[in-house]
């Protein structure tokens, strides 16, 4: 009897373990789009494959090697948006690919176009999570920048950020991150244009999803031809990950969401500051700049009456000079963009001018970032504002109210941010 109970208990435990493993496997399959009953390549997301893996898949399918090159060219050179568009492949092969693999893990849930040409897309992932991606064409240059998400939601809880207000759902997989840029690139190629810049300033904290983000960075370089210096990674300041990035010396542009150099005020806005002080962050940034030779951009959302005074600019300049050579830091200011969960207001034109003038007199490079996409909630910190509407069936997602925009005509052109990273970026 005792032995029977023991065996029964063991059997129950084994069953529970099997069920947990099955649940985990099913969750991964929902996220990746893989068919749980598939063989090695069956049900594979085509965007998850590197060029080498694509070659191996074609070989395993019993096809000639040049078919892999054709598929690759269709995806990343011609910008095919479906297998059906790969017209240089036999119809039988297109049908086989359609049956045996998955063409991506993103489906468009909503798309909005701003008056200034900015395009915001909400993508539904295979497990139902929603993320947002923003494409920013510029009529006055060949620069085409896409802002991509690295997480569904965000755990950092920044008070002025709509994504931080919604909370964290899960990490994005490398192919889910990469595919956002690949689809933007395909859209542009259809129009005879090319993607020039990628900024990790969408939903989520990129360095909190470090391995997956870096895997996506590798794919951006290898498959889309985006140079490291045209890739910007934003962070609230995760020190251990910044140190890790320093050691890897990837030559990407690092953008630090600073917003205050007073610990109490920064901690109130950015909870991550409670784990590491502003001084510790700046010391780490100094080490990063020294090891990589790359200038760091410090993001500063100007909030009326909070962090926009000349005294704040003086203190910012003093601390930056104390920790970094002047040529290794740049301050990128932008008036605060409105979000539903943050009641503060943006700094006016004259306040922006005074803040920039103080930094310039102190020898600190500083520019004002152009604000775009505000009429579709695509501005800095606004991503995820509309996602709740998409989650509630029957509630249409429309263009929101147009907030009073920043009067760029009153700021000299030398102060408009025109570097390799985007004029418009998102924290």
Image: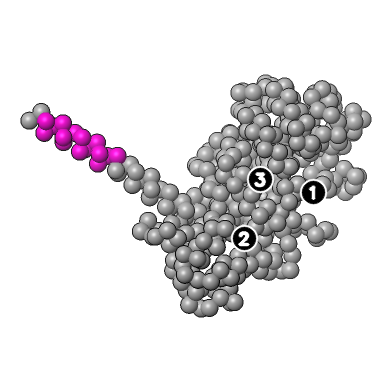
The residue indicated by pointer 3 is 200
Question: Which of disc 2 and disc 3 is earlier in sequence?
Answer: 2
Q: CA distance from mark 2 to mark 1?
A: 21 Å
The residue indicated by pointer 1 is 420
Write the start and end of the magenta stretch as one range: 3-17
Q: Position of residue 331 (x, y in %)?
A: 80, 35
Q: Is residue 287 above or below residue 151?
A: above
Specify whether 318 is left or right of 377: right
Q: Residue furthest left?
A: 1
Instruction: Determine the secondary structure under disc 3.
Output: strand
Location of the C terminus (image quadrant)? top right
Instruction: Determine the secondary structure under disc 2.
Output: helix
At x 73%, y 62%, the residue is: 194
The residue indicated by pointer 2 is 183
At x 81%, y 28%, the residue is: 324
Q: CA distance from mark 3 to mark 2?
A: 15 Å
Q: Is residue 327 above or below residue 112?
A: above
At x 47%, y 70%, the residue is: 62
Q: Nearer the viewer, residue 88 or 133?
A: 88
Q: Position of residue 57 (x, y in %)?
A: 50, 62
Question: Which of disc 1 and disc 2 is earlier in sequence?
Answer: 2
Location of the N terminus (image quadrant)? top left
Question: Which of disc 3 and disc 1 is earlier in sequence?
Answer: 3
Estimate how packed mark 2 is, as few (under 14), some (14 to 19) or many (20 or more) residues with alpha carbons within 10 Å.
some
Estimate how packed mark 3 is, as few (under 14), some (14 to 19) or many (20 or more) residues with alpha carbons within 10 Å.
many
Q: Is residue 342 above or below residue 104?
A: above
Task: Identify the image quadrant of residue 406.
Answer: top right
Estimate how packed mark 1 is, as few (under 14), some (14 to 19) or many (20 or more) residues with alpha carbons within 10 Å.
some
Q: Nearer the viewer, residue 4 or 51?
A: 51
Specify whether 8 is left or right of 114: left
């Amino acid at each position: 009897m005792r032995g029977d109970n023991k065996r029964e208990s063991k059997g129950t435990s084994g069953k529970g373990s099997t069920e947990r493993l099955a649940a985990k496997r099913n969750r991964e399959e929902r996220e990746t789009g893989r068919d749980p009953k598939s063989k090695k390549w069956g049900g594979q997301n085509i965007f998850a494959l590197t060029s080498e893996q694509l070659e191996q898949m074609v070989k395993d399918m019993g096809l000639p090697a040049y078919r892999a090159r054709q598929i690759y060219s269709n995806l990343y050179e011609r910008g095919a948006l479906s297998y059906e568009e790969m017209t240089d492949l036999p119809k039988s092969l297109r049908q086989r690919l359609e049956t045996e693999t998955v063409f991506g893990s993103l489906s468009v849930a909503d798309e909005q176009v701003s008056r200034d040409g900015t395009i915001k897309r909400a993508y539904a992932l295979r497990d139902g999570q929603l993320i947002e991606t923003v494409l920013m064409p510029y009529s006055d240059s060949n620069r085409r920048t896409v802002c991509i998400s690295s997480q569904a939601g965000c755990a950092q809880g920044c008070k002025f950020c709509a994504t931080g207000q919604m909370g964290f759902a899960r990490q994005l997989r490398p192919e889910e991150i990469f595919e956002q840029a690949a689809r933007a690139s395909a859209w542009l190629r259809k129009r005879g244009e090319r993607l020039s810049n990628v900024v990790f300033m969408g939903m989520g904290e990129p360095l909190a999803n470090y391995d997956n983000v870096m895997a996506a960075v590798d794919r951006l370089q290898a498959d889309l031809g985006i140079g490291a210096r045209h890739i910007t990674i934003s962070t609230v300041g995760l020190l251990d990950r910044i140190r890790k990035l320093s050691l890897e010396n990837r030559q990407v542009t690092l953008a630090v969401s600073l917003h205050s150099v007073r610990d109490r005020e920064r901690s109130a806005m950015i909870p991550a500051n409670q784990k590491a002080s502003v001084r510790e962050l700046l010391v780490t940034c100094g080490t990063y700049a020294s090891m990589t030779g790359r200038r760091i951009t410090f993001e500063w959302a100007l909030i009326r009456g909070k962090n926009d005074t000349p005294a704040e600019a003086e203190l910012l300049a003093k601390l930056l000079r104390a920790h970094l050579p002047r040529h290794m830091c740049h301050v990128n200011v932008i008036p605060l963009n409105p979000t539903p969960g943050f009641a503060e207001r943006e700094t006016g034109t004259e306040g922006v001018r005074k803040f920039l003038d103080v930094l310039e007199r102190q020898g600190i490079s500083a520019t004002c970032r152009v604000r775009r996409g505000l009429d579709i909630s695509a501005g800095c910190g606004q991503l995820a504002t509309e996602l709740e509407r998409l989650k509630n069936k029957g509630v249409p997602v429309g263009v929101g109210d147009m907030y009073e925009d920043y009067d760029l005509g009153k700021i000299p052109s030398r102060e408009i941010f025109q570097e390799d990273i985007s004029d418009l970026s998102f924290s």
